[in-house]
Amino acid sequence: MTSAEISCSVCLLVLEEHTEAYCNACGQAYHLNQRSDIPGADCGEVWISEDHLALEFACNNCLRPPEPLATILDSAEAAALAGTTEAALVAAASSGALRHRRTSSGVYLFERGDIIAFAKGQQ
Ligand SMILES: [Zn+2]
Ligand SMILES: [Zn+2]
């Protein structure tokens, strides 16, 4: 059994040891560079709670919830987010494996959260 790589719930890229953090709100992993001597992206924040004097972690998904419309993706946007092809997403949607809405003009629409869950399931 190989140890699975953990990917960031915000940008979906793989986390390195020094950038691994867990959001206190949603429990998902995200990028938080904990080394000032190594470059790394931050996909969330950490601060000291005044109530508990403990470190609190929050990912950007929870700190900055997307605008309602930004959670709806067309198949091209969804494919880019999931790192797959539009055809693969449409196939998954058609087979019932992926929640979607098909517009009267035949455009497939997806919700961001469903696509992130789908991408994780594919790994
Ligand atoms: Zn990230
Ligand atoms: Zn979170």
Image (tube, rainbow, N blue to C red):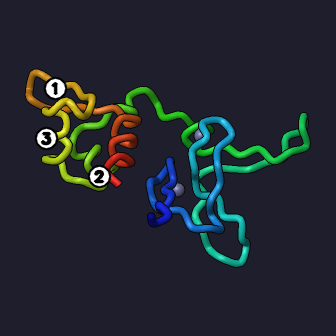
**Dot 1 or dot 2, earlier in sequence:** 2
Amino acid type shown at disc 3: Ala
Q: Is residue 57 visible?
A: yes
- Residue at image position (62%, 38%) is 63
Amino acid type shown at disc 1: Arg
Q: In the image, 112: left or right of 19?
A: left
Q: CA distance from mark 1 to mark 2?
A: 19 Å
Estimate the x, y position of residue 39 in percent, counting from the top left.
Answer: 62, 74
Q: Is residue 82 above or below residue 103?
A: below
Rendering quarter of residue 115: top left
Numbered tag placed on residue 80 in the rendering: 2
Question: Are the residues flagged by discs 1 and 2 in contact, CB closer than 8 Å?
Answer: no
Q: Nearer the viewer, mark 2 or mark 3?
A: 3
Query: What residue does disc 1 label?
Result: 102
Query: What residue does disc 3 label?
Result: 91
Amino acid type shown at disc 2: Ala
